[in-house]
Amino acid sequence: MRTITLCAFGALALLASCATENIRGTEIPDTPQNRAVLEVFFEYVSALKEKQPEKLIALVSESYLDHNGTDDAADDVDYGNIKTFLNSDAYGKIKAMNLFFIIKDLLLSDDGETAKILYYYEVRLKTDRLVAPEENSSINSDKEKWLKETEVNQMVLKKEKDTWKIVSGL
């Protein structure tokens, strides 16, 4: 009986020593590949919060294409669309941005060249009001308005040379 108990404890100790630690606050294994992918995601979040279009564009692949979950090609977004939006008046009129996110999962392809991050986000934007509010209809001013969006999203990244780039899911 003592031998069985010692073998069981030995097996548990062996399993515990082989177990991969998770990245703090997630259930994602703490590996160099996962950390590299998440670093790009965190740079993306930082660039959004700080309204740094050059930094955002640097994270995006020139082969970026997002079908927005539809078969309608009219709503597809590519690299050129992103650059155009980041240099537009609409983007320039964003006065403040609050961003909250929770990473749900990170999946690497078997060849280690593609990664998918599933995450929940809430973004609040303060922007110029285009239309005056109806009387007593808003706590916002006549000139500015806060907009809010929440959603679950999937960002896809691919390795280009030795760098992870976003190929869809902004």
Image (tube, rainbow, N blue to C red):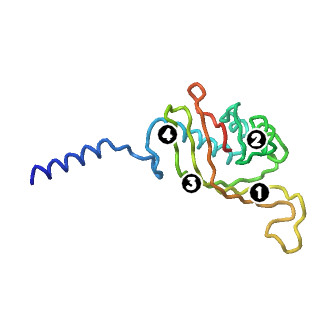
| Mark 1 neighbour class, 10 Å CA radius: few under 14, some 14 to 19, many 20 or more | some
* Residue indicated by mark 2: 77
User: Which residue is more in the foreground, 28 or 52?
Assistant: 28
Q: Secondary structure at mark 4?
A: helix
Q: Earlier in the sequence, mark 3 or mark 4?
A: 4
Identify the residue at horizontal 13%, vertical 51% (top origin): 4
The answer to whether 2 is drawn above or below residue 55 in the figure is below
Q: Secondary structure at mark 3?
A: strand
In the image, farthest residue toward the bottom? 136
Residue 113 found in image quarter: top right
Q: Residues under labels 2 and 1: Cα distance?
A: 23 Å
Identify the residue at horizontal 57%, vertical 42% (top origin): 116
User: Which residue is more in the foreground, 102 or 67?
Assistant: 67
Q: Residues under labels 3 and 4: Cα distance?
A: 16 Å
* Residue indicated by mark 4: 34
Image quadrant in which the C terminus is located:
top right
Identify the residue at horizontal 74%, vertical 35% (top origin): 79
Q: Residues under labels 4 and 1: Cα distance?
A: 33 Å
The answer to whether 132 is drawn above or below residue 15 in the figure is below
Tell me the kind of residue under disc 2.
Val
Image location of residue 41, percent across then percent down: 59, 42
* Residue indicated by mark 1: 126
Residue 60 found in image quarter: top right
Q: Earlier in the sequence, mark 1 or mark 3?
A: 3
Q: Residues under labels 1 and 3: Cα distance?
A: 22 Å
Tell me the kind of residue under disc 1.
Lys
| Mark 4 neighbour class, 10 Å CA radius: few under 14, some 14 to 19, many 20 or more | some
* Residue indicated by mark 3: 102
